[in-house]
Image (cartoon, coloured by chain):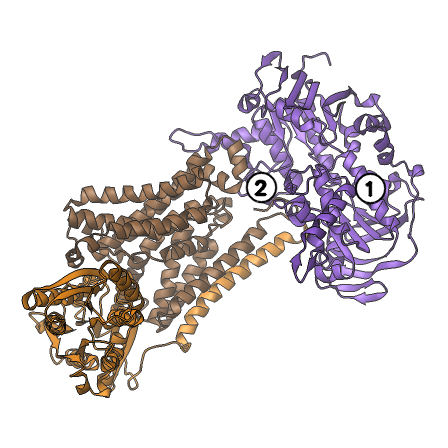
């Protein structure tokens, strides 16, 4: 039979104390790792920060993507010229509540400027209002929010989409069936890029039918699956409009593997898309110099942050539309390699 | 006592299809009477108990409680009428206090479902003092030793105002002193007029605490008399028939003992110590002998066995196997040296309850019946059927899940698992707890044949009767130390009990 | 007092206080009123989910579907306000009722179909999420995606008294009520009994099936309340709301001392556990640790809590007795 009678109560008490101490030590330890800078910081330091004069900026992205990485690069290029600015890149994990939490944290941390690419235009609105109350200017990139803020810097979604429709319609000879591979709902950019395309088609090529408009989550792989399904229902499909390049490239993959000749247009202007255009696999895309977009945003932000113009001086929301090029085989050569992202 | 009986069941019969489980069985309990109910597994005991507690209805017969005829087959009604069962498996909620458990599911309330703690505590204190049961109402069940948990179960039954209590193997897992304590409680219950049906395989207990005995065999009541009027051999004969009775009766004279077996030392401990468990243990185990280690709970015997088998580590001394000093790091290396271990808690540590008899039997010898890592069904079936017939495992179907077997047969499966490996050294910890007399005899026979084949057998046992029946040499441990090693030929049960107790 | 010595959350409270103290010392921005508000606002809904999760875990089960129930409830609110234009006093009870029913269905699957809680709630986690997408107003009417909910009664949940958001008071209120039920009612005792030894509970005449269904319904209701807070704060809802949040709820419950084997625990601990996680995550953010490290750290804290729970369970067992 087992025995354990002697000293159990003494051992028990000692264990109690040890355990609370261990738990406490873990708590303190995790805090200490943060302070001792455990090698996972993503603040990029400008020069040595004077606590009062340093300007803090944060960019809360939708989720890691070529577009937002390029913006961040553009922003940092501008900021590195300025003295005493720090820049923090944060991941929204494609979740609205995560972005809200991050906004709260950076507001509390005393940032001077916030850039955000909202996951949910409505959901982020209360947080933007909160920042506004504290006099922190907020810039939205590409995806607008319903709450008024300092400025919205976007690619020219609507008009660019009209031009894409025009270019595609011309390539199709004015007739045929097309499908749209779309973004998930909840963001204004989706409406703009879709409406522009639809309006453009209706006005210029009324004989072209849009037979499908399916969600492919901004994702290349998902787009492959979705297009395959669409093709089963519409084997005579002639054209595809991917609301971003990733989805258009997914369509291109499907066309290649099935040996189909489709007219495929994307939107954004990624490096991969430009190469595909040069190779003749992709018909075209709307190219925006995203680095430039980042630089514009950063420059405007710095002006506001250094007090040159206070955010409250804006009586209406600033709206910067980026210039663009509809890149097709003919025009793609004009985009220099340093501009590709 | 000429008072009216609390419970009188007459001519109870239960037939399942063509199988007669119980035939014309009658049993009666008077206030203050402790009646033992004995019978081998399969004799109809559990059927009788289930009828008395209302779990099943008899095919024929009647039950009269306190003079009134009762319709059988209704468990809630039986509880209301004061028939309560205290079983081997725990009916308590381990995370809650004693106070909560006493009134489990029936706590008094103040309306709206809000608990009436005051009344609950007052009621509980009154109950405990009436039956002189000493319990800390706020202690958590899981923190109590087994005997205290048993007392809570008894108190819980008393809280339901039980007049007749069925105690099923109440002393399993209890040490000697705890058994004494339990008997004190039972005696108090007697004085309060509670009737008790006491079910046990341990004959010593029958003779100590019970007034009357009812013996069941093959579904029939073969004897119903005061305990004082039947001798132990007579009782055994009635219980299991003549042939097995003489095998099991273990009169010292009839057994040949082989202290030190063949003389070849298979295993030796020199000054073995483990902090907090045992200290300076030294003995030698020879092939061809059965060496029993006995003592009170807390003496360190099980800890010693686990250390020898490699399940735990030790802190000092040496372990010598086959002449060379070894450091056994795990049961695997112990098995490689030809050791087998049949643990104390067969459910938790020994058997895979949901798996079949066959699967359990071959568990230790999987490499022997496989080729290139794949099990060979032919070899497995052969090994299994041979084992089942040698050990007389009932039922003999190897596909049956082992948890459906009786305790005795489960133990045989567990031993059988190790026998397949033909161990040179076999360690058994309390091998016949909860095993009926018939199966016990069979287990002893198995051990003796192993011994004849030259194995060295180490048995830990708290059952004095068992120790005196099977051992060649006896080692008594007390408080973690070796009190003495005795030749079974030259020492009596009385002496051993004395050494264990501290003379 | 003997009772005081038996409060199981002493050590947790001590850890909470020392963690807060450490971060306050290390970061000036941590010890501001705004930060307290952020932590309370950001983790009250986790606190609610943890309270809800405590009930199934007490029974020895678990509820993996709370994130999906939260999203479903939120989407029902979205549809109710924006598609059907119904007022708050009608929509809010409906969303809560839906959440409670979803939880009760979990309970019924476990009782009637005899499914393991893990399996049953894993299945409903997928099913309720799918249902959320199917009824999503944002997918059916994409223009609604850019419209915010303006209902006064809904927005009324998003306010403050000083640094304390209303959501926090809701969480504390629910915790107090739930604890009263657990400690002072027969139903509460029955829950512990079922969690401690389900057979003993059955044999004692406790309606085990009913206890199970009610517990999972509670978990669902708390998910609905959490949805209410989130939708009120965001003025909208998403289909992917609450994905993965069940892990935080379970972690908070375990940190709060609710044992995974059942039969032990309370609801005060889980609330402290939820805010402790908030303190750690936000504190680390303010100290500059990247958000990528945060799931890793949540996992580490959870691991520590589970290990501690196991040690405590072993300690509660008398060596020769039944294990708790």
The answer to whether C105 appears left or right of B141 in the picture is left
In orange, which chain?
A
Taking the spot 77% from the left edge, 57% from the top edge, the residue there is B339
Q: Residue C20: image x %, image y %? A: 38, 63
Chain B display color:
purple
Q: Residue B321: image x %, image y %? A: 82, 62
Circle 2 sits on which residue?
B141
Taking the spot 62% from the left edge, 23% from the top edge, the residue there is B51
Q: Where C183 falls versus B200 (above or below)? A: below
Q: Where B394 falls versus C279 (above or below)? A: above
Helix, strand or loop for disc 1:
helix
Taking the spot 28% from the left edge, 71% from the top edge, the residue there is A259
Q: Where A201 falls versus B404 (above or below)? A: below
In brown, which chain?
C
Are the residues tagged 1 and 2 within 8 Å (C-beta)?
A: no
Q: Nearer the viewer, residue C31 or B348?
A: B348
Circle 1 sits on which residue?
B444
Residue C70 seen anywhere in this rendered image of the structure: no
- Whether marks 1 and 2 lie on the same chain: yes
Dot 1: chain letter: B
Quarter-of-image position of residue B209: top right
Helix, strand or loop for disc 2:
helix
Residue A190 seen anywhere in this rendered image of the structure: yes
Please state which of the two labelled residues, at mark 1 or mark 2, is closer to the viewer: 1
Which numbered tag is attached to residue A264?
none
Q: Where B415 falls versus A198 (above or below)? A: above
């Amino acid at each position: 039979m087992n025995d354990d009678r002697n000293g159990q109560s003494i051992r028990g008490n000692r264990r109690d104390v040890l355990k609370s101490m261990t738990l406490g030590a873990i708590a303190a330890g995790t805090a200490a790792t943060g302070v001792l800078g455990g090698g996972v910081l993503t603040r990029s330091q400008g020069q040595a920060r004077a606590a009062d004069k340093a300007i803090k900026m944060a960019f809360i992205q939708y989720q890691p993507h070529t577009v937002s990485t390029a913006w961040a690069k553009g922003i940092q290029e501008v900021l590195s010229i300025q003295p005493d600015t720090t820049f923090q890149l944060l991941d929204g994990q494609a979740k609205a509540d995560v972005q809200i939490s991050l906004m709260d944290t950076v507001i509390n941390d005393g940032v001077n400027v916030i850039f955000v690419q909202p996951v949910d235009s409505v959901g982020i609105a209360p947080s933007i209002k909160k920042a506004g109350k504290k006099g922190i200017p907020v810039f939205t990139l590409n995806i607008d929010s319903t709450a008024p803020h300092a400025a919205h810097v976007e690619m020219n979604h609507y008009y660019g989409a009209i031009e894409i429709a025009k270019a595609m319609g011309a390539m199709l000879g004015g007739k045929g069936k097309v499908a749209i591979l779309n973004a998930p709902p909840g963001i204004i950019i989706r409406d703009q890029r879709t409406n522009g395309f639809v309006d453009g088609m209706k006005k210029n090529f009324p004989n072209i039918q849009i037979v499908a408009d399916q969600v492919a989550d901004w994702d290349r792989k998902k787009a492959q699956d979705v297009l395959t399904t669409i093709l089963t229902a519409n084997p005579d499909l002639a054209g595809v409009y991917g609301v971003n390049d990733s989805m258009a490239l997914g369509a291109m993959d499907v066309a290649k593997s099935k040996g189909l000749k489709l007219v495929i247009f994307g939107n954004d202007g990624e490096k991969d898309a430009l190469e595909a255009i040069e190779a003749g696999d992709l018909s075209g895309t709307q190219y925006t110099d995203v680095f430039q977009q980042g630089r514009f945003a950063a420059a405007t932000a710095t002006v506001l942050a250094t007090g040159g113009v206070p955010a409250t001086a804006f009586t209406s929301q600033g709206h910067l539309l980026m210039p663009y090029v509809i890149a097709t085989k003919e025009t793609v050569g004009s985009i220099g390699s340093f501009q590709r992202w | 006592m000429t008072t009216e009986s609390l419970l009188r069941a007459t001519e109870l019969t239960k037939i399942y299809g063509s199988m007669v489980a119980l035939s014309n069985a009658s049993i009666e309990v008077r206030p203050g009477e402790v009646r033992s109910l004995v019978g081998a597994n399969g004799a109809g005991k559990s059927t009788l108990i289930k009828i008395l507690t209302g779990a099943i209805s008899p095919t024929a017969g009647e039950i009269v409680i306190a003079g009134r005829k009762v319709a059988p087959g209704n468990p809630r009604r039986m509880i209301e009428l004061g028939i309560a069962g205290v079983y081997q498996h725990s009916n308590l909620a381990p995370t809650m206090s004693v106070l909560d458990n006493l009134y489990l599911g029936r706590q008094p309330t103040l309306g709206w479902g809000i608990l009436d703690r005051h009344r609950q505590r007052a009621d509980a204190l009154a109950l405990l003092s009436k039956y002189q049961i000493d319990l800390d109402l706020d202690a958590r069940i899981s923190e109590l030793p087994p005997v205290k948990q048993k007392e809570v179960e008894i108190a819980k039954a008393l809280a339901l105002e039980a007049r007749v209590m069925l105690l099923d193997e109440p002393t399993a897992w209890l040490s000697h002193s705890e058994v004494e304590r339990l008997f004190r409680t039972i005696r108090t219950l007697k004085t309060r007029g509670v009737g008790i049906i006491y079910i046990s395989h341990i004959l010593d207990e029958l003779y100590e605490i019970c007034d009357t005995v009812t013996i069941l065999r093959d579904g029939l009541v073969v004897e119903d008399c005061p305990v004082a009027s039947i001798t132990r051999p007579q009782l055994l004969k009635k219980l299991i028939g003549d042939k097995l009775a003489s095998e099991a009766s273990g009169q010292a004279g009839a057994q040949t003992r082989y202290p030190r077996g063949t003389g070849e030392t298979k295993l030796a401990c020199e000054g073995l110590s483990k902090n907090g468990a045992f200290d300076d243990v030294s003995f030698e185990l020879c092939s061809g002998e059965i060496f029993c280690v006995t003592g009170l709970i807390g003496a360190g015997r099980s800890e010693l066995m686990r250390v020898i088998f490699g399940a735990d580590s030790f802190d000092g001394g040496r372990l010598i196997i086959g002449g060379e000093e070894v450091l056994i790091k795990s049961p695997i290396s112990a098995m490689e040296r030809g050791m087998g271990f049949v643990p104390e808690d067969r459910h938790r540590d020994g058997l895979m309850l949901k798996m079949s008899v066959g699967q359990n039997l071959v568990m230790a010898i999987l490499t022997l019946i496989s080729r290139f890592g794949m099990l060979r069904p032919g070899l497995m079936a052969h090994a299994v059927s041979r084992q089942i017939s040698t050990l007389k495992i009932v039922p003999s179907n190897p596909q049956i899940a082992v948890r459906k077997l009786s305790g005795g047969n489960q133990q045989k499966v567990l031993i059988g698992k190790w026998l397949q490996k033909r161990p040179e050294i076999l360690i058994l910890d309390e091998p016949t707890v909860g095993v009926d007399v018939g199966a016990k005899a069979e287990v002893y026979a198995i051990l003796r044949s192993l011994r004849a084949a030259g194995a060295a057998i180490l048995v830990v046992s708290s059952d004095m009767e068992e120790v005196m029946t099977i051992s060649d040499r006896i080692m008594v441990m007390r408080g973690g130390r070796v009190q003495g090693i005795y030749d079974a030929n030259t020492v009596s049960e009385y002496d051993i009990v004395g050494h264990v107790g501290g003379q | 007092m003997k009772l005081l010595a038996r409060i199981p959350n002493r050590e947790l409270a001590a850890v909470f206080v020392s963690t807060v103290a450490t971060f306050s010392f290390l970061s000036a921005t941590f010890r501001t009123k705004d930060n307290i508000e952020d932590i309370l606002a950001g983790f009250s809904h986790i606190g609610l989910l943890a309270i809800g999760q405590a009930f199934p875990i007490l029974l020895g089960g678990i509820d993996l579907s709370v994130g999906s129930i939260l999203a479903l409830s939120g989407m029902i609110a979205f549809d109710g306000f924006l598609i059907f234009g119904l007022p708050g006093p009608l929509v809010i009870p409906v969303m809560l009722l839906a959440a409670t029913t979803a939880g009760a269905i979990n309970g019924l699957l476990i009782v009637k179909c005899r499914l393991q809680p893990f399996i049953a709630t894993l299945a409903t986690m997928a099913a309720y999420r799918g249902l959320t997408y199917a009824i999503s107003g944002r997918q059916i009417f994409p223009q609604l995606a850019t419209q915010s909910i303006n209902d006064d009664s809904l927005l009324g949940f998003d306010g403050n008294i000083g640094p304390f958001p209303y959501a926090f008071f809701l969480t504390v209120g629910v915790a107090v009520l739930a604890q009263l039920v657990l400690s002072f009612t027969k139903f509460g005792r029955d829950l512990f009994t079922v969690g401690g030894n389900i057979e003993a509970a059955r044999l004692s005449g406790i309606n085990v099936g009913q206890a199970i269904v009610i517990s999972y319904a509670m978990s669902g209701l708390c998910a609905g309340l959490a949805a209410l807070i989130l939708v009120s704060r965001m003025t909208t809802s998403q289909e992917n709301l609450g994905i993965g949040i069940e892990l935080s709820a379970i972690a908070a419950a375990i940190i709060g001392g609710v044992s995974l084997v059942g039969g032990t625990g309370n609801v005060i601990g889980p609330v402290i556990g939820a805010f402790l996680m908030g303190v750690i995550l936000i504190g680390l953010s303010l100290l500059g640790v990247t958000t990528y490290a945060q799931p890793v750290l949540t996992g580490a804290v959870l691991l520590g809590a589970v290990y501690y729970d196991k040690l405590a369970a072993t300690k509660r067992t008398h060596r020769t007795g039944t294990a708790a």
